[in-house]
Image (tube, rainbow, N blue to C red):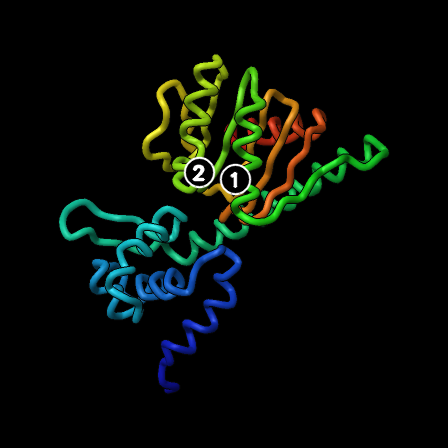
Amino acid sequence: MEQFDIEKEYRSAARNLGTFSLSEYEIRAYISLVLNGYGSAETIAKTARIPRTSAYKVLQSLSGKGFAYTTKGRPTIFKSESPGTIKKLAADRIAETFDRLEAISELFSERGEPQLVFTITGRERVMKKISEIIDKTEKYLVISTPSFSLLRREIEKKLQNAIKRNVEITLIAEETGRVPEGVKVIRKKEQIATDIVSDGERAFIADSDLEACGYTENPLLAQHVERFLIVSIER
């Protein structure tokens, strides 16, 4: 029987799981969880061959992305989500992405003219655009994101100021942590992008790590993104 080569498995999985925006440490930790079934951060650090100081944070990140979950008690024990579930998650994400593209393509065709969408790259510029959107909002703001923890530190004061202006804010996320008082929270799992709609006039779509985004002030496109968010919640 051919000897099992764990390093070969790591390299092979890294090429494929990289599409989920997983880091190398996260990939190693997930494979280690699959092989062991469960484990503490210390155990997984050993078998995944990642630094012990990084293991807990890496496993928490995997949990936030749906690849693992924790049990109660101390030390915290992590269990892997089954590969079959991850496979379905990947299929659902791909389907959702292409549904989004198809709907936007149909909208373009109906209009018979190109719609103006700006592309912004670089996390600092992306965050600056998010802040500008919040500052411009007068009536309502919808934020749907898998990464609110990445946003909160930089926009919390902006959201508080918007609430003082009587802006109605809805946050759609699986895990939110602390949110400003007055923000309506809707729990939703397995999101792949950060979407923002402001007053039905502005729309923003960014990748999971907020390194690039598309932005439009075209009301038709903004309302299309808003309808997409409503449908995704209903699903």
Q: Tell me the element at label 1.
A: helix
Quarter of the figure with residue 138 = top right
Local packing at callout 2 (Cα closer than 10 Å; few below 14, some 14-19, many 20+) is: some
Q: Amino acid at mark 1?
A: Met
Spatial CA distance of label 1 from label 2 is 8 Å
Q: Amino acid at mark 2?
A: Leu
Q: Residue at x 65, y 36 (%)?
A: 215
Residue furthest right in the image: 112
Residue under label 2, please give it.
Answer: 151
24 lies above or below 180 = below
235 lies above or below 213 = above
Q: Residue at x 30, y 67 (%)?
A: 50
**Viewer-nearest of discs 1 and 2:** 1
Residue 88 appears in view: yes
Contact check, label 1 and label 2, Cβ < 8 Å: yes
153 lies above or below 78 = above
Q: Residue 132's x, y, as percent? A: 56, 30
Q: Residue 17's x, y, as percent? A: 48, 61
